[in-house]
Amino acid sequence: MRIGETMSEEDWQAIASRVGGVLVLIVGVLLAASLCGASTPPDHLVPSIFDPHSTPAESIRHLSHFVLGITGLIFLVVFSLLSYVVVKFRSRVEGAEREPAQVYGSTQIELAWTVIPILIVAILFLATARVIHGIQDAPRPAGAVELTAIGHQFWWEFRYPGLGIVTANELHVPVSDPAHPTPTFLKLLSADTDHSFWVPQLAGKTDLIPNRVNEMWLDPHETGLFLGQCAQYCGTQHAKMLLRVYVDTPEDFNAWVRAQQQPANQEEKEAAGRLVFERTACVNCHAINGTNGTGRFGPDLTHLMSRNTIAAGAALNTHENLRLWIQNPDAIKPGSLMPAMKLNDAEVDALVRYIETLQ
């Protein structure tokens, strides 16, 4: 097409097809975002950064919308210009041997494609730095809950030093009333390799690195169950190193604390099962208050039955799953570091009955 010529029907069809493709892509992105941000069940079983329920997560969502808006605008401008150029200046039979007009040394063009990207990058950098500063340097109120999260292959250990509580895989924190904030501050450690603590609706990702202490905080505004995941590949069972965060009312959280501070059940009728635990290799990895088990390589079992899942969320905490987990851990979590104990049926039955008393 030469300058001054009108566009043919084929040209308009080509442009229309490209514009249609762009619109379909945009609609798909918006639909995906709306699905992520749609209201979820009370237990928030669909983790999404677009459905925040905590102060840090809300800051991240606002930043993500800002970045998506700018990058989406850039995409529309670039794609529109590219579509126009592809259609208007596409190769034609007539004049195929002629070289297109060349542009050299245009100061305006050089300045435009240098200054504009620099400004965009500067704006995105400053916006991101502001959010990072606001999250990392947030003040710690006097009533904040403090705990230590330790990543293991392939489970989570949670310690509440001020409350004398040790638990695993299922984290309990109080809801934070904006009028009286009760945030939860986590000190993140790793016992072996790199892990990453990520509960999308409560906070951003923070890595757990050997020989390094990282920190993060949660400020949930709504009660319920929030799901998360180890977001750093840490070995065979990385995909089943799940996180469950229960945000409780202040009353429920205090009740949970009191229950976790109680000693382990010492019923004499389950002495046979306790004896199996104390005389096998279980004590090398697990701890139960009131027994000779003081292991730290595996989860503390003192109140195992207060948890809804076992194996870091890989299976529900039922009689059948608990028995299978003891007999053959690989049946639930292939590649887990817990060995099969090679117990006979009577020993397994006695051990399971004893563990089921550990409320």
Image (tube, rainbow, N blue to C red):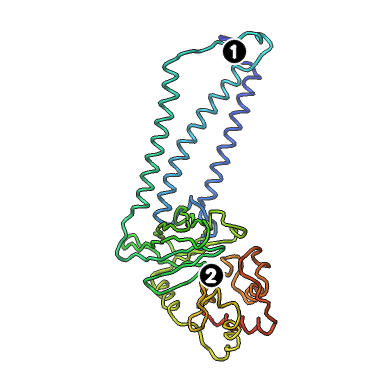
Q: Position of residue 102 (x, y in %)?
A: 53, 12
Task: Determine the residue positioned at 54% across, 65% down.
Answer: 155
Circle number at residue 297: 2
Task: Determine the residue positioned at 53% across, 89% down.
Answer: 267
- Three-letter code, disc 2: Phe
Circle number at residue 6: 1
Task: Determine the residue positioned at 43% across, 41% down.
Answer: 66
Labels in figure, total:
2
Quadrant housing residue 147: bottom left
Depth check, front residue: 192 or 236: 192
Q: Position of residue 318 (x, y in %)?
A: 61, 74
Instruction: Judge left or right: residue 203 versus residue 32.
Output: left
Distance from label 2 to label 1 (Cα)? 76 Å
Mark 2 vs mark 1: give the one in front: 2
Q: Position of residue 286 (x, y in %)?
A: 54, 75
Q: In the figure, 279 relative to 214: above or below?
A: below
Q: Position of residue 312 (x, y in %)?
A: 56, 66
